[in-house]
Image (spheres, helix red, strand yellow):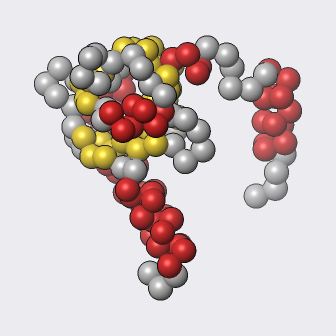
């Protein structure tokens, strides 16, 4: 499953938001009913994981974390503590908790951005400018694509 899109929406007074129809259709076709929402580890946004994508991430982390290493267990705890399980209601909406809204700096306007097998949710005003200036983006992409595997 690969999400693609850059769609603006609004939360209501309770913090509910409609998941864009294109993303809902993809989840439905894939049979994904459970979703996991957590803060992003790098930026001030939220990441919505279909359950299968979440389980893959969790398996990757768990395989590298020793249950005997306290520092590694703290990283796993932090990763898990930020996560909330959710489902869409009959109208295709889900509730973003106040805690997560605050962590991402979201007030009402949001932007959904499909990133590989997840969907990022940003405060819309944070996405008004490009994430990187065009020249810097081109330079960084060239460096990444030139790496040896």
* Camera-side residue of 12 and 18: 12
Q: Quadrant of residue 28?
A: top left
146 left or right of 85? right
Give the quarter of the figure containing the C terminus. Answer: bottom right
What quarter of the picture does the N terminus occupy?
A: top left
Q: Residue at x 59, y 19 (%)?
A: 127
Left-right relation of 99 to 127: left
With respect to residue 50, does 88 lie above or below? Answer: above
Q: In the displayed orientation, state which residue is furthest to the left.
A: 90
Quarter location, residue 26: top left
Q: Position of residue 17 (x, y in %)?
A: 30, 21
Counting from the top left corner in percent of width and height, residue 145 is at 79, 42
Query: Position of 122 compared to 11: left or right?
Result: right
Residue beneath the point at 80% across and 21% down: 134
Instruction: Provide residue 97's location: percent of width, then percent of height.
Output: 30, 35
Q: Quadrant of residue 101?
A: top left
Give coordinates of residue 53: x percent, y percent: 40, 49
Foreground residue, 97 or 54? 97
Residue closest to the eye, 89 or 108:
108
Q: Residue at x 26, y 17 (%)?
A: 13
One can see residue 63 in this view:
no
Q: Which residue is drawn at the image coordinates 55% and 16% (left, top)?
A: 125
75 over 5 or under it: above or below: below
């Amino acid at each position: 499953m690969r999400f693609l899109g850059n769609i603006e929406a609004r939360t209501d007074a309770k913090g509910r938001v409609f998941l864009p129809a294109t993303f809902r259709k993809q989840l439905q076709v894939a049979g994904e009913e459970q979703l996991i929402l957590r803060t992003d580890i790098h930026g001030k946004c939220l990441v919505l994981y279909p359950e299968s994508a979440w389980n893959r991430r969790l398996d990757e982390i768990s395989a590298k974390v020793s249950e005997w290493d306290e520092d590694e267990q703290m990283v796993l705890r932090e990763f898990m503590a930020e996560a909330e399980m959710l489902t869409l209601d009959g109208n295709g909406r889900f509730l973003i908790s106040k805690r997560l809204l605050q962590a991402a700096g979201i007030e009402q306007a949001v932007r959904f951005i499909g990133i590989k097998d997840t969907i990022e949710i940003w405060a819309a005003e944070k996405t008004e400018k490009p994430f990187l200036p065009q020249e810097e983006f081109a330079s960084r992409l060239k460096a990444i694509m030139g790496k040896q595997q």
